Amino acid sequence: MNNKKTNNSIDEIKEINANPYELDKFSKIPSWIKILFLKYWAAAAAVFFFLISNFLLDFTQLEEDSKTPSANLTIDFVVILFICLGLTLFFTYIVRPIVRFMFNRQDNTFKYNMVNIKGLWALPINFAYMFLVSFAIYPMQYIFTVKWGINTNLFGQAVGIDPFTYGVMFLIVDSIALLIKNGIIMIYQRVSYKKQINAD
């Protein structure tokens, strides 16, 4: 009787591990969808942890002190810097390594990263790129909230934008920047290839 139970348990284990190299459901999801979700999470997390949580800066006090246009511009600039700081840390130490880890011969995931370099230069270059992206997102947020009257902030008026909306806007701006970058690389490669053919 015990032998039958043992044999049944062994057969069940064999069925479970029949094909250890079989792809799971998560691996069947295209890499670009995973990367989009990862970037969306990173952008939303940067806004939440570095602005809305008020861990690093009391924006309520800043709003009380903002009585002049120059003070408002200063607040906007500080907000952009803090968002950039969060984006830089998340993308440099979480998003970029994961995207590089997903690279293989059939799927060049490097093209989904604007900054692919490693080392000390990765941090300042990533910060510069995130500053440009955040600077481009700010007019979009102004159009939504002021011009069109759409309240995009789900967590009060201190920041002016919620993490979920910022994540969507980030994906839009980042995707446009990546299209331009990859387009330039493709054109350069084609020109270089044609020059090699003509030279031969």
Image (tube, rainbow, N blue to C red):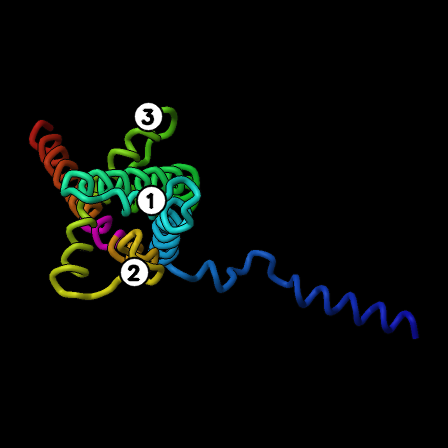
Label at residue 75: none
Mark 3 and 1 residues: CB-CB less than 8 Å, in contact?
Answer: no
Percent of width and height locating residue 87: 34, 42
Residue drawn at the location 21% of the way across and 38% of the way down: 74
Whether residue 98 can be seen here: no
Q: Write down the residue under mark 1.
A: 61
Give the residues in magenta: 170-176
Q: Write down the residue under mark 3.
A: 121
The vertical placement of 172 against 84, above or below, is below
SS type, badge 1: helix
Label at residue 153: 2
Q: Quadrant of residue 98?
A: top left
For label 1, the crowd category at 10 Å Cα-Cα, with few meaning under 14, some 14 to 19 and many 20 or more, is few
Instruction: Say what amino acid the circle numbered 3 marks.
Output: Trp
State how far apart marks 3 and 2 are (Cα): 34 Å
Left or right of 146? Residue 121 is right
Residue extending farthest bottom: 1
108 and 32: which is toward the camera: 32
Mark 1 and 2 residues: CB-CB less than 8 Å, in contact?
Answer: no
